[in-house]
Image: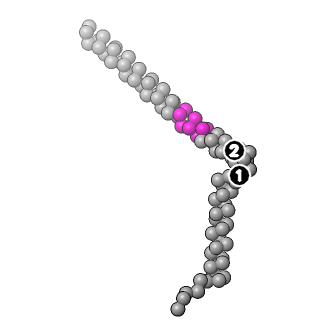
Amino acid sequence: MNKVIQVDRYTRYVDEIRELKDRNADLEKLNQRLAEQLNELHGEYLELRYTMKGMASQVEVLGLRKKILELQNKLHLKYPPRHKQ
């Protein structure tokens, strides 16, 4: 009789552990979704902040830097630096 009680207790613990693992997996998925939403909201907040202050956004700044580098490269190709002799 003692063995029957232990098996029943073991089965109950196994079921409880399985439920906790499932719950943990659900919470990890929820956490991931919330982290993604937070990142999106933060990006939108920064965009709004830059707009309200009349500042260029990070995307615009990166685009301008790229354009500057392209223009510098064109200038160097058109007018290569002269070496002193």
Q: Position of residue 36 (x, y in %)?
A: 58, 40
Dominant secondary structure of the residues highlighted in magenta in the image: helix
Q: Residues within 10 Å of mark 2 (few under 14, many from 20)?
A: some
Q: Residues within 10 Å of mark 1 (few under 14, many from 20)?
A: few
Residue displayed at 74% across by 50% down: 54
Q: Secondary structure at mark 1?
A: loop
Write down the residue under mark 1.
55
| Image quarter of residue 49 | top right
| Image quarter of residue 2 | top left
On residue 14, the disc is none
Q: Are marks 1 and 2 in contact (CB under 8 Å)?
A: yes
**Which residue, as the protein is rendered here, is positioned at the far left?**
2
What is the three-letter code of the residue carrying label 2? Arg
Q: Is residue 49 above or below residue 80?
A: above
Write down the residue under mark 2.
49
**Numbered circles on residues, count:** 2
Q: Is residue 15 left or right of residue 5?
A: right
Range drawn in magenta? 29-38
- Residue 84 vs residue 80, the one in the foreground: 84
Q: Is residue 84 left or right of residue 53?
A: left
Residue displayed at 70% across by 54% down: 56
Q: Secondary structure at mark 2?
A: helix
Residue displayed at 66% across by 61% down: 63
Q: Which image quarter is the N terminus in?
A: top left
What is the three-letter code of the residue carrying label 1? Met
As for residue 70 lying within the magenta part, the answer is: no
Q: Position of residue 44 (x, y in %)?
A: 67, 43
- Residue 26 vs residue 59, the one in the foreground: 59
Q: Position of residue 55 (x, y in %)?
A: 71, 52
